[in-house]
Amino acid sequence: MTGSLPAMEIDETPEPDGAAQTPDQTDTGLSSPTETNPPVPDDTAGVPPDPIDQDARTDPGSRPWIRPTLFVIGSLLILALVASQTYLITTLGQTRSDISSLEAEISDVETAVGDISDEVAGLTEEIDTVKDVRQRAEETSPAPSVVEGFLPRFAAGAQDTALGLVLPEISAIEAYSEETVTIDPSDGMKRVWLIWAHWCPYCQEELPMMAEWYPQNAAQFPNAELVTVTTAMDPARGNPLDEYLAAQQFPLPVLRDEDGKLSAQFGVSAFPFWVITNGDGTVLYRTAGLLGVDQVEQLFTQLEAFES
């Protein structure tokens, strides 16, 4: 067969829309890949959006200020905590320092009270000794008078041999009235004698204290009085006496010992010098040095209560 088979022509004419489907295109109930699915009803229509859910679904990158803000807040909280701790530590340290200072002051006061107690105890012993001396003397003879009108010179730390002796009459010019004053130590009045020098720094400290304390408290001691004697006058040693007296105007009797006789009568060995006499002129106590107001008040209290 030399002839060729006739070629099969393919009809490329499109089928009309109403063309029947081939068996291979039979409808199975499945949608075509290009076919759009029917919409799903929205059950949330009309319901306000949940802010928490909305925030959870929000992209963190859309709020770049959150982390810096949290960092700043955290830093401020840490600084506040550190500041409060620092304040507490500083306050605690200051409180401890104040407590230590208070304890030191209490210790100083206790020491001062102890010193005063020792002075009072010593004075009590001296007074008891004088009582024993007077009792023994009265059993034998009257109290002896001072030889030639002078008490023995006072020696600190040694037994005072003037205790129990009778102080003789004291006579001198009073500095402010410029009148001669004569005092009989045995006239029944108990006395605290303060002998001082105008150039003595301890006397310059002692006298203003006595000038303030004695006038305010003299009424408490009706049977005892304070008498001062200024002696050892020497313009070359400073603080001239007349100018000093004029400036101070002491509300106390001030006897001027122009020639040093009174100083010798009392047995003065240092300034300021103290002599305590009973109402009969008997010497009860002598001491030298600066005394505080509390100590002087204790002397007057003891003397006021002492039985003549």
Image (spheres, rainbow, N blue to C red):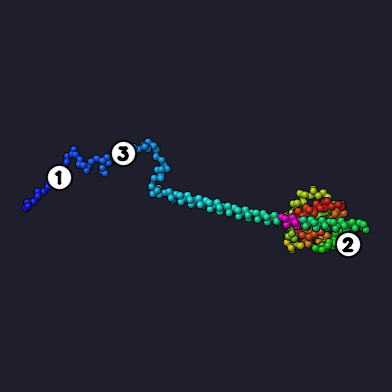
Picture residue at 20% right of the left edge, 41% below the top: 22
Q: Are marks 2 and 1 in contact (CB under 8 Å)?
A: no
Say which residue label 2 marks: 147
Label 1: which secondary element: loop
Report whether 259 appears left or right of 91.
Answer: right
**Residue 262 appears anywhere in the view:** no
**Residue at image mark 3:** 39
Q: Nearer the viewer, residue 258 or 113?
A: 113
Classed neighbour count for the residue bearing mark 2: other residues with Cα under 10 Å, few (<14), some (14–19), many (≥20): few
- Please, what is the three-letter code of the amino acid marked with disc 1? Glu
Q: In the image, residue 153 lies at what x, y percent? A: 83, 63
Callout 2, which amino acid? Answer: Val
Q: Name the residue that disc number 1 marks.
A: 12
Q: Is residue 112 magenta?
A: yes
Q: Is residue 270 visible?
A: yes
- Who comes first in sequence, dot 2 or dot 1? 1
Name which quarter of the figure residue 101 lies in: bottom right
Q: Name the image quarter holding residue 170.
A: bottom right
CA separation in Å, label 2 and label 1: 174 Å
Query: Badge 1, how many Cα within 10 Å: few under 14, some, many 20+?
Result: few
Q: In the image, which residues are magenta? A: 109-116
Q: Is residue 39 left or right of residue 308?
A: left
Looking at this view, is 79 or 131 the one in front? 79
